[in-house]
Amino acid sequence: MQLVECVPNFSEGRDKTVIDAIVNEIKSTDGVTLLDVDPGADMNRTVVTFVGSPDAIKEGAFRGIKKASELIDMRKHSGSHPRMGTTDVCPFVPVRDITMEECTEIAKDVGKRIGDELGIPVFLYENSAQKPERKNLANIRRGEYEGMEKKLQDPKWHPDFGPAEFNVKSGCTAMGAREFLIAYNINLNTREAVYATDIAFELRKKGRSVREGNTDPYYFKGTIKRHDENRYFCGSCDYKSESIEKVAEHTEKEHDYDLYWLLRAHEHDPTDLVGNSVKRPGKFDHVKAIGWFVREFDCAQISINMTNYKVTALHQVYEEVKKLAEQRGLTVTGSEIVGLVPYQALLDTGVYYLNRQGRSPGVPYVDILETAIQSLGLRDKTAFDIEEKVIGLPETEKDALVKMDTDEFVHEVSRDSAAPGGGSVSALAGALGSALSSMVSNLSIGKRGTEKVEEDLKPVANRAQEIKDALLAKVDEDTDAFNDYMEATRMPSGTDEERQKRHDAMQTGLKNAIMVPFGTAELCLEAIELCKTAAMKGNPNSITDAGVGALVAWAGVQGAVYNVRINMKDIEDEDFIAEHNQKCEQLFEAGKQLTQEVRMQVNDSFIKD
């Protein structure tokens, strides 16, 4: 099913009655799931996050924007965050089974409706931008609400939808499709917003003006360096030239950045630079940042928009801010994520810190996420609940077998129903075997004297986690596959056509029922291989745990092969049967040999001199 995320930013963060009214309009839309509401009193801004199908998202977004236009009067608005309308910005983000191009069409549909029905000027930005200068939201919003009336008079800044006349009550709205944006704030032990801004300018891609003289420790205290007549400067080194073209060639070759892009980002005309400040780029691509004081937290924050976490990661920015803060005599006390954060972004950060600590990242994903949360100080000022704040977490159905307590699962297996049965139990056995190989590896990583084997065991721990999770999923997949076959047997069979459909569905159901335990057998075999490595390289005191892991994983191989073969007797495709009988024999023999090798390793450890 197609799933889209929408993250409108409304210019009200103090009046709970207004915020609730807007949110209620959104969440009452059929097909919309509200994920997060994040108001900020100092910013006077609320970020709402919801997901749904394309049609539901379009309707929910329009309702929220309409209600905001009715209840918020921009003539009375003030706050620390840049803004230009009652709904300042409304992005649509592809989440599942939908393209960026389709999200652009959603933005256009909603934008046109807002312009036509509400009379609000709408600008398309990011991936939806119809003009290059409108791709960057900061270019559209420059001048903010107070400057938009004059801006709209310029034909170059006529809106994409709605009237080219200023809506004095509602202002303007930016709408578009974009990748996931992480709104990330880093807290400092100071109330001085200018100190936070000084660091922010070092981070953001567009960088800052070059200064000279008294720049240590606070760069902003220096004197701005300016281009002279027939003397143009590189902002990244001492190079200078009589030609800006030569400076641009220099920055491209020596510093790998486009000087013309940098100048345009600061609204400087490359043909008229005399007297203008020299610019240098910041440290990170896909990063926008400013500094401000947050009265609610009684501290200054560096407010960061990270527009592509796959290029610039959370931990990269956080560690750089710690370094820059220390240079200025400041301390980072923690950080805050406004709205939601992608699962992979936080997972990557957790893995980074585990590796940095010399610990294995081959642990359950919740442990990795918790490491990221603690390392970034995400609970410094506000609560951070993984289930509420992380989007894209691995999902398990609420009524899944693996959600049961151990005793409940065992009781369920013992009842007089065909499923869960041997296939589900085989998958669980393999998952336990893989978990033990991970345990032995993790016990042998990061300890004194284990340096020589860590590089061998870290991949074991990582892969063991993947196999464990895959086999846990197969506990339910095995039962579901059997249920699909049983559904086919219940199909009508009153006519020849119905009987043929039922027959074909049963044959398909049997093949599917075979492929699940066959996949289980393959994974269980790999789990035995991991147990063998763990037994050879791991802590000798835990070798029996690796041995137990191999034994239960071997039971998983055997049980899964049994389940493949028992379901073959009613399959009519002889080539299919021959192929999978041969593969099962290979799996069986390989598992038997590997388990025997592990058993010998374990037994040898019992021999005393």
Image: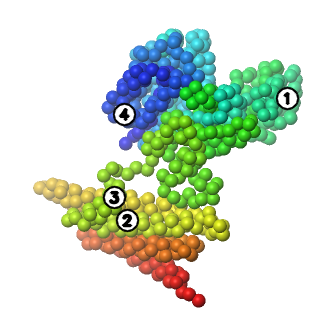
Q: Earlier in the sequence, mark 2 or mark 4?
A: 4
Q: Position of residue 133 (x, y in %)?
A: 62, 25
Residue at the spot 37% in from the left edge and 65% down from the top edge: 428
What amino acid does circle 3 point to?
Asp
- C-alpha gap between disc 4 and disc 1: 56 Å
Residue at the spot 63% in from the left edge and 32% down from the top edge: 302
What amino acid does circle 4 point to?
Val
- C-alpha gap between disc 1 and disc 3: 67 Å
Q: Earlier in the sequence, mark 2 or mark 3?
A: 3
Mark 2 crowd level (few <14, some 14–19, many ≥20, 10 Å Cα)? many
Q: Earlier in the sequence, mark 1 or mark 3?
A: 1
Q: Mark 3 = which residue?
A: 405
Side of 257 relative to 65 (left or right): right
| Residue 510 showing in the rendered view | no
Residue at the spot 49% in from the left edge and 41% down from the top edge: 384
Q: Mark 4 = which residue?
A: 32
Q: Position of residue 135 (x, y in %)?
A: 59, 28
Q: Earlier in the sequence, mark 1 or mark 2?
A: 1
**Disc 1 versus disc 2: nearer the observer:** 1
**Disc 4 versus disc 1: nearer the observer:** 1
Q: Mark 1 = which residue?
A: 213
Mark 1 crowd level (few <14, some 14–19, many ≥20, 10 Å Cα)? few
What amino acid does circle 2 point to?
Leu
* Secondary structure state at the residue bearing disc 3: loop
Where is residue 591, by image quadrant? bottom left
Q: Pick the quarter of the image with the C terminus.
A: bottom right
What amino acid does circle 1 point to?
Gly
Q: Circles 3 and 4: CB distance less than 8 Å?
A: no
* Secondary structure state at the residue bearing disc 4: strand
Q: Mark 2 = which residue?
A: 428
**Disc 2 versus disc 3: nearer the observer:** 3
